[in-house]
């Protein structure tokens, strides 16, 4: 079973010419098989950040789903039949509480979106940098 760390021997002049002829005639080489677990192994050093980013993603998504519920609560409170000053006071308090909940949900959701974006961007940049470093070292080692 190949681990993906082996280097291919350099092509000689005849192999290079055959490869160029194949490309000119529309023949393509099959891409290397990269397993799903190979992709996970590349992200393993960044697992903690990915977990935090995923939790932030879930919280942000949940906050977006909760907004219509609280908006509906405000509409329900305002559309009630209010006749007495006590009912007006209760309705005003309920609207204030629902509005406060909406503000808190929006703030929490926005913070989670920012954290998610920052973590996913930084992790993806690190993974790509690691891939580039590995590719460059493999290319340098092929010619030595």
Image: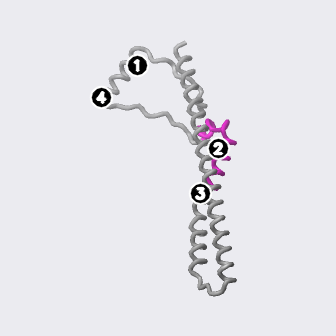
Secondary structure, mark 2, is helix
Front position in the image: 28 or 102: 102
* Residue visible at 64% across and 69% down in the picture: 98
Q: Which residue is mark 1?
A: 15
Q: Secondary structure at mark 4?
A: loop
Tag 2 residue: 50
Furthest residue toward top: 144
Secondary structure mainly formed by the magenta segment: helix
**Residue appearing at x 61%, y 35% in the figure:** 42
**Mark toward the start of the polypeptide (4 vs 3):** 4
Q: Which one is earlier in the sequence, the residue at label 2 or at label 4?
A: 4
User: In the displayed image of the protein, which residue is found farthest to the left?
Assistant: 25
Nearer to us of marks 3 and 1 is 3
Return the disc, 3 or 1, that comes first in the chain's sequence. 1
Mark 2 crowd level (few <14, some 14–19, many ≥20, 10 Å Cα): some
Q: CA distance from mark 2 to mark 3?
A: 16 Å
From the viewer's perspective, is the residue at label 4 or at label 3 nearer?
Answer: 3
Query: x, y percentage for residue 127?
Result: 59, 34
Question: Marks 2/4: CA distance?
Answer: 44 Å
Report x, y in % for residue 90: 68, 78
Q: Are marks 4 and 1 in contact (CB under 8 Å)?
A: no
Which stretch appears magenta? 37-60
| Disc 3 secondary structure class | helix
Q: Does the residue at mark 2 contact the one at mark 3 (Cβ under 8 Å)?
A: no
Whether 76 is among the magenta residues is no
- In this rendering, the label closer to the viewer, 2 or 1: 2
């Amino acid at each position: 079973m190949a681990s993906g760390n082996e280097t291919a021997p350099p092509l000689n002049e005849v192999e290079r010419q055959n490869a160029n002829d194949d490309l000119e005639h529309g023949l393509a080489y099959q891409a290397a098989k990269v397993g799903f677990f190979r992709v996970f192994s590349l992200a393993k050093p960044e697992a903690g950040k990915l977990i935090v980013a995923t939790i932030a993603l879930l919280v942000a998504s949940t906050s977006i789903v909760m907004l219509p519920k609280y908006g509906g609560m405000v509409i329900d409170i305002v559309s009630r039949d209010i006749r007495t000053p006590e009912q007006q006071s209760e309705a005003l308090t309920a609207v204030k509480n629902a509005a406060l909940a909406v503000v808190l949900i929006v703030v929490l959701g926005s913070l989670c979106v920012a954290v998610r974006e920052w973590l996913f961007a930084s992790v993806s940049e690190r993974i790509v940098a690691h891939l580039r470093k590995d590719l460059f070292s493999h290319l340098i080692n092929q010619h030595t």
